[in-house]
Image (cartoon, rainbow, N blue to C red):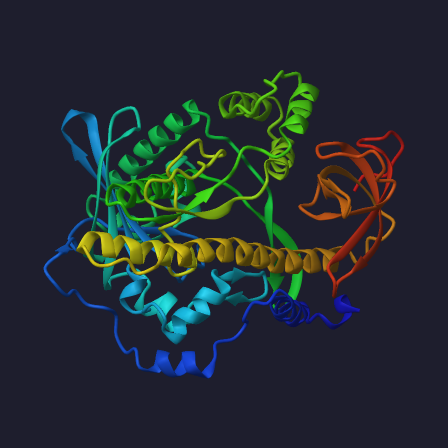
Amino acid sequence: MHNDDKQHRAVLQKIARRAMLQRGLLPDFSNEVLAELDSIRAPASAEGGQVRDLRDLLWASIDNDDSRDLDQLTVAETMPGDRVTIRVAVADVDALVKNGSAIDEHARHNTTSVYTGARIFPMLPEKLSTDLTSLNFSEDRMAVVAEMVIGPDGAVENSDIYRAVVRNHAKLAYNNVAAWLEGNGDLPEAAAALKGLQENLRLQDRVAQSMKNLRHVHGALSFETLEARPVFDGDEIRDLEVDKRNRAKEIIEDFMIGANGVTARYLASKKFPSIRRIVRTPKRWERIVELADEHGTKLPHTPDPKALEDFLTRAKAADPVGFPDLSLAVIKLMGAGEYVAELPGETAPGHFGLAVRDYTHSTAPNRRYPDLITQRLLKAAIEGSPLPYRNEELEILAKHCTEEEDAANKVERQVRKSAAAMLLEHRIGEEFDAIVTGAADKGTWARLLTIPIEGRVARGFEGLDVGNRIRLQLISVDVDRGYIDFRKIGPSGQKGSRQA
């Protein structure tokens, strides 16, 4: 039905909007939000005596090619003793989005921007998130800066957080920067046009790699999953494109992990509460042990992140093609991340996957509400102002943010499944190799090895568990509901079966 009318984008937009409403999320901004928005005419400007002027530093943004909501800038500075100061400037969204305002209430309700292949549902109106509170190229913007002094071994030796006015001197994209860093492309024009930025990016890359290596020594886990988004030719879906890791993404990832840790410790040092991002000890460690055993590795009976990381490193080297599927299986078995309030004097669990104890979300306030909460706490701590939230309110907000993040993930997953169903509509009866990604009372799920598509094993699922490799036949799809159903026909790579 849908492949005949070629209006795939419109169909997916309708599905996305319906999914938002079904999950209790707001797809549109209210009249009150729009009226309030109309009264905001310009970016925030510096006020008070605690705002530094850092506009002359070589700030640059590195983000997706099509990103318009720029939350952070980075810059590096060499120091004596082979140390490097890394600064991460985060957009001061709170300067324009006041706690309790109509705009804030909408953001508090949804708690996150929802990114579907057909449409984005931004947490904040685009007049703010892509303009007045975005760290746009060649614009002066207010920011909260996390400053880290990084030693030769990648450790954070000293840190500080303060407010500043900054200026983005180069808007760069992950893929172009990564191609240059990895020797597969030229220096992006925007970087070449700014004296000293080439060397600064090399320095940032070196420091990020040392920070990553240190985390992995302590047991941070090396995951690699296949997140796919629909690719359109006009309004017709043509393919699913996998988002791949690269060196430029690792710069931002490692600096953001560092900044989030610095933020958590800064709030604790000021005896302020915080909202922590945690991943608890894996819920199904025994199955992870079984998976490792199937790959020839013995893991201890009690959860051990360093042993798990060593296993993942060896598994990636042995089978780089199949590693994303193993990663996905381990991620599913670990359980989801969540937000919890850490009050002064308490100790929240750490982040098992990152091998860090102090971790919050602070670097994306244009698109994540926990980051905006953290920003308000930070600014109060910097200025010595009263707490913007009561402890009980933070506990409620942490639970709410976890629940709404889950709802947003389900909306995004629904649209991905509907897009995948569109691509498979004319392939009923074909056979595919797959890996089991979920096994519970509510159903058994598997991801195809040749196409980044996940579906339900509707028949022959008895006895299957996460990580099993199987051979499936596609038996039905339902685009509107995002259903893709298979039946198991044998183990993966069964002889005589037709390859996808």
Image-based side of 438 in relation to 36, left or right: right
Image-based side of 430 in relation to 438, left or right: right
Image-based side of 415 in relation to 436, left or right: left
Q: The N terminus appears in which quarter of the rendering?
A: bottom right
Q: Position of residue 133 (x, y in %)?
A: 31, 65
Residue nearer the viewer, 358 or 59: 358
Q: Position of residue 119 (x, y in %)?
A: 56, 67
Which picture quadrant has residue 156? Answer: top left
> In percent of the image, x 76 and y 66: which residue is there?
3
> In percent of the image, x 53 and y 43: which residue is there?
244
Q: Measured along the vertical axis of the image, is residue 351 above or below residue 153?
A: below
> In percent of the image, x 68 and y 70: which residue is there?
11
Residue nearer the viewer, 159 or 201: 159
Residue nearer the viewer, 367 or 315: 367
Residue nearer the viewer, 271 or 339: 271
Q: Measured along the vertical axis of the image, is residue 41 above or below residue 198?
A: below
Q: Position of residue 415 (x, y in %)?
A: 65, 60
Q: How many marks?
A: 0
Q: Measured along the vertical axis of the image, is residue 413 above or below residue 218?
A: below
Q: The C terminus appears in which quarter of the rendering?
A: top right
Which picture quadrant has residue 179? Answer: top left
Which picture quadrant has residue 130? Answer: bottom left
> In percent of the image, x 30 and y 61: which residue is there?
388
Q: Position of residue 92 (x, y in %)?
A: 28, 60
- Is residue 241 something one can see in this rendering? yes
- Is residue 186 something one can see in this rendering? no
